[in-house]
Amino acid sequence: MNLTLFRRWLPLAATLAAGPLPAQPEVPAPAPKIQFAELQHDFGRMMAGAVVKHDYVFTNTGGAILTINNVHASCGCTATADWTREVPPGGTGRIPIQFNSANFLGTVFKTVTVSCNDPAQPTTVLQLKATIWKPVEVQPMFAVINVPPDAEGPVATTVRVANQLDEPLTVFPPESNLPHFRAWFATNTPGREFNLTIETVPPLPPGNTQGQITFRTSSTNTPVINLPVIAVVQPALSVSPAQLMLPAQLPTPPPPYVITVRNQTARPLAVSDVVSSSPVVSVALREVEPGRQFQLEATFPPNFELPPGERIQITARTSLPSQPTITIPVSQFPRPRPPGL
């Protein structure tokens, strides 16, 4: 063999004898990476109604362009303005947040979710915190009066009014926008704390009656306070369910359907004469708690089916003068129609 060719062939032979070359590791493609300077911001103590702003600053510490796809606030009280959409490697961006403290009181936590194209961290949850206070604090901010069904006189509730300012507070006589409510103040601590009593003026209409109590104060920040109030007149009888809705096809054997009747008055109740308008449906009466709670058990025959559009009803007599009869309608879901019809 020619000496020159032999010298060229020798390194190749050594390589072949050593085996195949090791595979080279794949170099990952450059990717963006988001990093925030802070994940939580505390606005501190602020007066209710103040609107504050803050910018969350972030940096792209990766090797590709970072894209912010979406910014979603947890509720309408936080509003996001135009955030930075794209950031090159090494660049910074910002996400402006606005928080409206109206209708809040005490410590408040809110979140803002940021979505981006960072493969390792596609979403980031930012938090904001604030402690809201009012110059004149009213607790509760919505007065509810639960009126028993057989209440013969007024029913009242109390609301606390506290002064959070340094100077003494004067409250003036409250006014109601409805004749169904009246209110007055009692002083707990002069200039600092008051009790506002709100009571109903009978007779009240059935159901819910909603009104508003208004009073003026000496505070320049809160000169007028409007307090919503609702009176909930409880029904004398609670019937559950109020109607029976049967499935299209009853199971075999059909189970009894139970209707619960609860007496919410102070006087004992008697229930009798439980009947069904259908001769094939039987109803049994059971007194669970004497004078207070009853159960009506309706039993349907196998393969029971109501004609389309028809209803039956279950009725019972009571000893309550204001509601001498209980009526429970019974209906049924229609059966599925065969294919092609």
Image: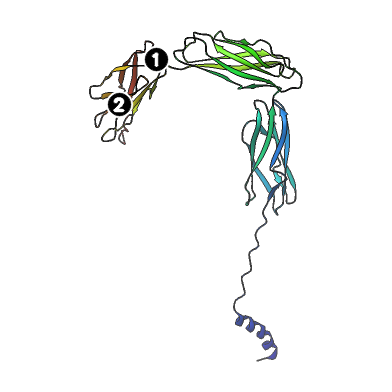
- Outermost residue, front direction? 189
- Please state the horizontal and vertical placement of residue 11, each as a whole percent of the image: 67, 83
Q: Is residue 281 left or right of residue 46?
A: left
Residue at x 69% of width, y 27% of height: 133
- The C terminus appears in which quarter of the rendering? top left
User: Relative to 32, does residue 133 appear above or below in the rendering?
Assistant: above
- Mark 2, mark 1: which one is toward the viewer? 1
How far apart are the two marked residues, 2 and 1, measured between alpha carbons? 24 Å
- The residue wearing badge 2 is 297
Residue that extends furthest to the left in the rendered view of this protein: 279
Closer to the camera in the image, 223 or 111: 223
- Say few, some or many: other residues with alpha carbon within 10 Å of mark 2 (under 14 / 14 to 19 / 20 or more): some
- Specify the amino acid type for callout 2: Glu
Q: Amino acid at mark 1?
A: Arg
Please say if 190 is above or below 333: above
The correct choice, above or below, for 256 with respect to 65 in the image is above
Q: Horizontally, is 340 left or right of 191 in the view?
A: left
**What residue appears at the point 33 percent right and 16 percent down from the top-left corner?**
270
Image mark for residue 267: 1
